[in-house]
Image (cartoon, helix red, strand yellow):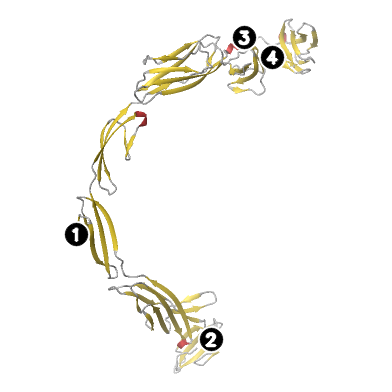
Amino acid sequence: MNAPEGFNYTWTDSKGNVRGHDRTLKADAGYEVYTCEVCMTEAADCCFELSTDLAPRYPAPQFSWRFAPKNCRSYVQFNNQSHVLVKYDDKDVHTKETCDQIIWDFTNRLGTQTTPADNPLVECDPAGDTIYVSLKAVLGGGKCDSVLLDTLFIPTILSQDSIIIQDICEDEPVIFAGQQCDTTGLYYDRQLNYAGCDSLTILDLRVHPKSGTTYMTDTVCSSDLPYELNGLNYVYSGTYSQTLYNQWNCDSIVQLSLQIIEKLIVEVDSIPTLCADGKQLTIDYAVMQGQYDSLAIRFTTTTPQSVFYDQMIYDTLLTQVVYPYTDSILPNHYHVQLEFYQHHSCGNQIYDFDFEVRYRSSIVEQKWNDVLAILNSRYNGGYTFTAYQWYKNNVPLARETGPYLYQPLDSTAEYSVELTRADGIAVRSCAFHPTTRTDTQPFPTLVQKSQHLPVRRGNNDASMVERVNIYSSLGQCYSSTLIVGGEGFVTAPAMAGHYIVEFIKSDGCCTTQHLIVY
């Protein structure tokens, strides 16, 4: 490190250690900062300080370029951006200090050139070129240098002749190269492109005649609306014109004569579930649009024809058909089809309905507050059943598949039972609404063998139960139990069967209740 000549010198390192008093200080390369106090020889108190470090310094070659064609010649403008790079322990610092020297080497289709210029302009092949670039940056009088290599691909500046093929309609000329063109043929336009080179555009013009008028006639039902033609929708009868374009985008006229026939629309009410004692089947319908010529009503072949019979109706003002029946009708699943004929129009309207005739609700009889039973064939119209399924509020009850339903009854609910006949047909009964019976003692009705049965105290002392007697269906006394204090337990018989329970109260009155042991 050399300080300016003609002064007195004191060199120190970053720790304040004096390292010498000569103009030149030799030290090991490294990252140490050195300070030199420089004093006038004639005035020792007139001093200034210089500092530096010995961090490694490297030449960093760098450049930018831009494509700059002109007058149909291809040029690339290069800009030198080389500088000094200083490396510290933890980072590299790119400085604004320039290198001592730079040397460019360029090789392309036009040859090779070497130059020390900062911003050289290099000419390339106008048909497109590849430039191989070498930039050397030098420091320390040539003792330290670095080379940057790069390859640039330069596009052509020459324009190819372009051909435009255009179809037009007669009487619709186009403007090309400043002239009006309305006949089939080739037209030329010469221009200069962005690089100043000739550019030729050729127009291949084809002129086509316009199409004539096409006439169409069609008939459609109102149910098929909208009527679509060439992307347009129509919903009314009439004559319509469309202006279309043929394959060359020339006018084409389509004239449509459209007739719309009103489609028959009928609303038929669904058929509710019937009860065997409901007296009649009523079919209600209403014509909402159009008019029918006749109505055919057909029942399935399994339907009793004496009750529900096929018929043709020609009175188009009717809105209801009634089929009366007696309570001897067979509960079953039925099917009816209504076909409204609309002749000379858009076809017939067909409606199919499944309906059910259920057993009358009186086929179920309430025995007590916890028993519902099915009447036997002597009282139910002569039916014999092979299977049962009880329902509460239209929900099947689990494991309730016998002719009796034994459980506390809900007077706010509706009960029904699905009954299967010997012919395999299963039909439910109409809803049965139980009532609360006040003539029975709150005591279990259906019990297991030897089950302990509770006896509950009455509302007052006079109604307290003092003794409970159990009799068989033949009147034989099975057991007699003394009840102390009006409450206690009675043991059910050990054999299955039907029994009568007698409650003897403190006031001398007695009541009885049916007991079933299983």
Q: Amino acid at mark 1?
A: Gln
- Badge 4 crowding class, 10 Å Cα cut-off, few under 14, some 14 to 19, many 20 or more, is some
Instruction: Report the front residue among 73 and 498.
Output: 73
Mark nearest the camera among 3 and 1 is 1
- On screen, residue 281 versus residue 265, left or right, reads right
Give the labeled residue for mark 1: 179
Looking at the rendered structure, the secondary structure element under dot 3 is loop
- On screen, residue 60 versus residue 380, left or right, reads left
142, above or below 81, in the image: below
Specify the quadrant of the image occupied by residue 402: top right
**Does label 2 or label 4 sit earlier along the sequence?**
2
Mark nearest the camera among 3 and 2 is 3
- On screen, residue 176 versus residue 104, left or right, reads left
The Cα–Cα distance between marks 2 and 4, rounded to whole angstroms, is 119 Å
Mark nearest the camera among 1 and 4 is 1
Looking at the rendered structure, the secondary structure element under dot 2 is strand
Q: Amino acid at mark 3?
A: Gly
Give the labeled residue for mark 3: 382
Give the labeled residue for mark 4: 442
Looking at the rendered structure, the secondary structure element under dot 1 is strand
Mark nearest the camera among 2 and 4 is 4
Q: Amino acid at mark 4?
A: Pro
